[in-house]
Amino acid sequence: MQAQDLEFVRNSILSYLQARPNSADTVEGIQQFWIQWRDDALPLSVVSGILETMRNAGELEIVNLGGRTIWCAAR
């Protein structure tokens, strides 16, 4: 995996949220629906790590709902 792959995922998530600012989803939903993969999708663990990095940067936040972690834009 290369830095450009990580940047692609981050930019895809930010673009999705820019177009749909009230969106929220699980890491599985984000991997499947928010990112338009050019080739095979990156592993879920990689997407999850990117989400955590974005959370630490103040770009995303999580809500725990029914035992699931839901990701959304930071408010």
Image (cartoon, rainbow, N blue to C red):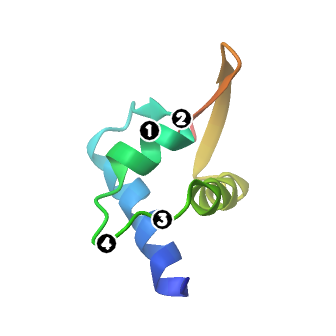
- Measured in 3D between alpha carbons, the distance from the residue under mark 2 to the one under mark 3, in whole angstroms, is 15 Å
Three-letter amino acid code at disc 2? Thr
Q: Name the residue rendered at 73%, 56% in the picture.
A: 56
Q: Which mark is residue 26?
A: 2
Q: Is residue 64 left or right of residue 14?
A: right
Q: Are marks 4 and 3 in contact (CB under 8 Å)?
A: no
Image quarter of the N terminus: bottom right
Q: Where residue 70 sits: x, y (%)?
A: 58, 30
Which numbered circle lies on residue 10?
3
Name the disc covering residue 13, or none. Answer: none
Return the residue found at the far front. 40
Residue type at tag 3:
Arg
Dot 2 falls on a residue whose secondary structure is loop
Q: Amino acid at mark 1?
A: Gly
Q: Earlier in the sequence, mark 2 or mark 3?
A: 3
Crowd around label 4: few <14 · some 14–19 · many ≥20 (10 Å): few
> Up-down: is 48 above or below 29?
below
* 3D distance between C-alphas at marks 2 and 4: 21 Å
Rounded to the nearest angstrom, the CA distance separating label 2 from label 1 is: 5 Å
Q: Which residue is mark 4?
A: 39
Q: Judge by depth and name the residue closer to the eye, 42 or 25.
A: 42
Quarter of the figure with residue 74: top right
Contact check, label 2 and label 1, Cβ < 8 Å:
yes
- Determine whether the residue tagged by mark 3 lies in a helix, strand or loop: helix
Examine the rendered structure and indicate whether residue 52 appears above or below residue 2.
above
